[in-house]
Image: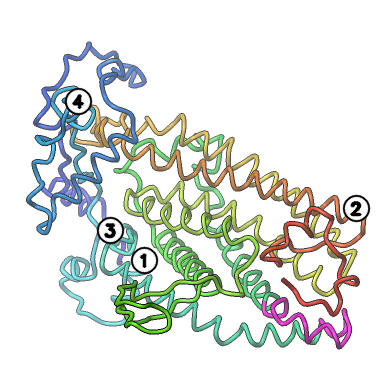
Amino acid sequence: EATNTSGELSKRRDSPRFACAPIHPSTHPPPKRKKRTKNMDSFPWEDYQHLPPGPVLFLSKLIDHACDNQILSVCSNWRSHVPFGIADPPNGWLSHKVEEITCFPPHVSYSDYLAEQPDQSASVSTLWNWAFHTDSTSLGTLSNPEAFAVLFLLTFLIRAIKKKFLPIFSAYGRQLGRKAHGPSWEKTNEERIQKFGEYVYRLHFHSMISLYGVWYFWGKEWWDPSKGGTTHLFAGFPYSHQVEPGMAWYYLVQAAYNLDALITIMEISFVFQLRSPIVLPGKESASLKLQSPLSVDWSPTCRGDFQEMFVHHIITNILIIASSYLHFTRIGSMVFLVHDLSDVPIDISKLANFVKWKKTTIVSFITLLITWIVTRLVIFPFYIYRSVLFETHLVLLTKEALAGTGVTVLQYYCYKFIFVVLIGALLVLHVVWFFLLVRILLVLALKGETQDLSEHKNGEKDHLEGMSTPSESNGKKEQ
């Protein structure tokens, strides 16, 4: 069949391209280590106390990455120009060079797959078997050309689906709005009608992707504490972390959806215009001036929660790319799932409030709060984030890492910093949004109505005053 055999993986694993960089760069002599005990948890951390913190290693990595290309190759020896001994080996903070992680199991491209199947030729059948029945293909990492091409096609497909169905969903919302708010409401609430279509689309996506996620990840050992739970996110990494086709496509679809979400928020928040870079003397200027050829202004359709959502989308897309590139798809899938599960009641509550179904709004909002607390304020920080903080060191306890052919200590400190900061930032947003939900709950309890706080771009005053009810704002244009 199309799946990889253990013998084929062993052959690839023994190949030179599978070899990892040594734990210590050649510019630094390995420190003297104390004799290890049989317990693998007794890692000699005291030998690495001289290493700089993760942010410094990451900065050094960025500079090396920029200077290693052909354009900036003149600065390849940049450390020799850094003053005050900051980059002088062996203990200068910028003296440590973090090598690329090269010990990942090789990805099976379509051409590699055909080469391993000499009795088969390129066809739709073999392409299907490679894409949907083969582990650890090149689709499992977004940095591969095949995965990037599929990501581009999926993003284009999602945008095409939205272009087709959003007007249909909005038209249905227009009909419901007339019945719920009266005919005059339609004329002054065109933006809310468009949002209704977006909420319906979001509800469809989050429902389907959540159902798939629950089905696919049901029984996975990293979700089951009785089987070791989150220790499987890092134990045996990366050798036992094969990317199954279901995981690869789950990641591709999620990446395409979040990329489209980032593009969409840019489209509705900014107005981009090309203009001449030269301003001739005239009414606007008495002399010749130069200006940027691209003009960027705020759009009148910018949402009130732009700052939070823009930061959220930026962090999410960086996490998707980083987790895919570093093969941490297991922990990335957990972050996806807890967000999608809590997004379903969010969409339902917004739709119910739109059509003034009070009982449905109350039930869905209470469900939203419970789901939010369980997924984003309990599972996310105390199960997922805790693992990132306290269990990532397991990548250094594999027999390959201890033998010097696995993930290095420098790589560990450098890349752990990225996930600690970004996932921590998501947690801060979860807490901020939770207090926003509590404010909405207070309005619901006091006035019996809810209001989407993102509907107003400059509505902070209205929000603090408790917001106007739909009946009070009937016929009033949104800000």
Check disc 3 and report its element: helix, strand or loop.
Answer: loop
The answer to which of marks 1 and 4 sits earlier in the sequence is 4
Residue at image location 82% in from the left, 76% down from the top: 476
Relative to 357, does residue 224 appear above or below in the rendering?
above
Main SS of the magenta segment?
helix
Residue at image location 30% in from the left, 73% down from the top: 290
Determine whether, in the image, residue 176 is placed left or right of residue 329: right
Q: In the rendered structure, does residue 45 fall within the stretch colored magenta?
A: no
The answer to which of marks 2 and 1 sits earlier in the sequence is 1
Amino acid type, label 4: Gly
Residue at image location 55% in from the left, 81% down from the top: 162
Mark pair 2, 1: CA separation? 52 Å
The answer to which of marks 3 and 1 sits earlier in the sequence is 3
The answer to which of marks 3 and 2 sits earlier in the sequence is 3
Check disc 2 and report its element: helix, strand or loop.
Answer: helix
Residue, disc 1? 133
Q: Return the mark for residue 445.
A: 2
Relative to 310, does residue 152 appear above or below in the rendering?
below
Mark pair 3, 1: CA separation? 9 Å
| Crowding near the residue tagged with mark 1, few <14, some 14–19, many ≥20 C-alpha atoms within 10 Å | some
Residue, disc 4? 92
The answer to which of marks 4 and 2 sits earlier in the sequence is 4
Q: Return the mark for residue 4.
A: 3
Q: Which residues are magenta?
A: 176-194
Amino acid type, label 1: His
